[in-house]
């Protein structure tokens, strides 16, 4: 077993150019952990938030980060070793997971990573490592917003516990940003539950979204969805932020808006319209990932891949992310 590995680290905050590919020690196993030989790494927004110094977060919410740091949370790979107290995983098992989130110590941009066993699930046999690594954060976000929160941790964004809206035949869901990571999983999970789904994205993604099961696609570059859609049960706004409130008028009374990136809302307006707004923060969850794995394995849910880059070219992957208009996920590949 080697003692050093290649990894991507931040020694300072800034643009993609601060991502440095270098030799670092292989991490040591702690109790409850599994050592994973990484084959692929999913790239997610928290990766570039960290690279930028977490300026996207209010100052009082920013955790203390010790530099240098290896970014990343989402991996797919093969178990190399397990701690003495770990059961359920053995060397040679193929696994995938979102590591230690919410937090910024996943350390996934590397050839090896230690992972809490509770954050991992068996990789679906029918999925290669690239597609498996693309799934954890985005799919778990969609799952915890739409299907099952799966924990009782308080949210930093709201006092009440997030409660998913029951979905089924007769419910209509709009997914904004439907071609992106969380969006394309949210669309498919809502369809799995039997809902009618309206997908909002740029026209270039229309055929992709129809293939995933969208009943209707609205091209936001030519049509404002809030002007043409009414009587929705739920809006999953994967873009979120300050513009999310425009979707309130599309909801029926009793409807809900779930902005993945929180914005400001007027409580009086919500009361007047008879609608609710709710958010949650995705958390690592191996058992939920195992449930998702079954849907991925049987083809009920598909993983869209926007692009792949070698681990050494993580900066190029971040440049791609900054250009936006993703169709699925960006993945880093790690040479065997």
Image (cartoon, rainbow, N blue to C red):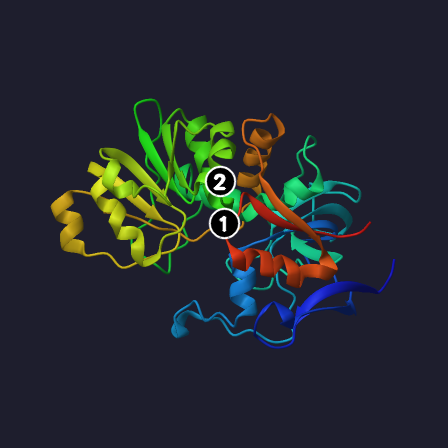
Residue positioned most to the right: 1
Query: Is 134 on the left or on the right of 260, as rendered?
Result: right
Is disc 2 in contact with disc 1, using a CB cutoff of under 8 Å? yes
- Residue at horizontal 55%, vertical 43%? 328
- Residue at horizontal 44%, vertical 39%? 203
Residue identifier under label 2: 204
Query: Is 84 on the left or on the right of 193, as rendered?
Result: right
Viewer-closest of 163 and 23: 23
The picture places residue 127, in percent across and down from the top left corner, at 67, 34
Secondary element at image label 2: helix
Residue identifier under label 1: 325
Using the image, determine if residue 205 lies above or below residue 108: above
The picture places residue 190, in percent across and down from the top left corner, at 41, 32
Residue positioned most to the top: 169
- Residue at horizontal 54%, vertical 67%? 50
Using the image, determine if residue 59 lies above or below residue 298: below
**Mark 2 vs mark 1, CA separation in Å:** 9 Å
């Amino acid at each position: 077993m080697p003692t050093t590995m290649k990894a991507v680290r931040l020694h300072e905050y800034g643009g993609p150019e601060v991502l440095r590919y270098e030799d670092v020690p292989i991490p040591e196993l702690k109790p409850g952990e599994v050592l994973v030989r990484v084959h692929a790494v999913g790239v997610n927004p928290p990766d570039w938030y960290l690279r930028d110094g977490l300026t996207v977060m209010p100052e009082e919410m920013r955790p203390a980060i010790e530099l240098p740091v290896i970014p990343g949370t989402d991996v797919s790979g093969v178990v190399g070793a397990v701690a003495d107290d770990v059961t359920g995983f053995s060397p040679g098992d193929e696994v995938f997971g979102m590591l230690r989130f919410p937090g910024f110590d996943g350390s996934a941009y590397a050839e090896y990573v230690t992972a809490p066993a509770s954050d991992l699930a068996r990789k679906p046999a029918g999925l290669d490592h690239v597609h498996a690594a693309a799934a954890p954060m985005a799919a778990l976000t969609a799952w915890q917003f739409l299907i099952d929160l799966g924990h009782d941790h308080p949210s930093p964004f709201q006092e009440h516990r997030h409660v998913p809206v029951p979905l089924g035949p007769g419910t209509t869901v709009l997914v904004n940003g439907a071609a992106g990571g969380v969006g394309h999983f949210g669309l498919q999970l809502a369809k799995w539950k039997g809902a009618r789904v309206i997908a909002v994205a740029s026209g270039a993604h229309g055929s992709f979204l129809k293939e995933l099961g969208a009943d209707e696609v609205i091209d936001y570059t030519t049509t404002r969805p809030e002007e043409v859609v009414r009587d929705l049960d739920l809006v999953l706004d994967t873009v979120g932020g300050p513009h999310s409130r425009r979707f309130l008028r599309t909801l029926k009374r009793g409807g809900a808006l779930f902005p993945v990136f929180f914005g400001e809302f007027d409580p009086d307006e919500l009361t007047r319209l008879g609608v609710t707004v709710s958010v949650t923060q995705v958390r690592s969850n191996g058992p939920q990932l195992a449930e998702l794995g079954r849907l991925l394995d049987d083809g009920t849910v598909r993983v869209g891949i926007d692009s792949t880059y070698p681990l050494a070219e993580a900066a190029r992957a971040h440049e791609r992310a900054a250009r936006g208009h993703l169709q699925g996920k960006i993945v880093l590949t790690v040479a065997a």
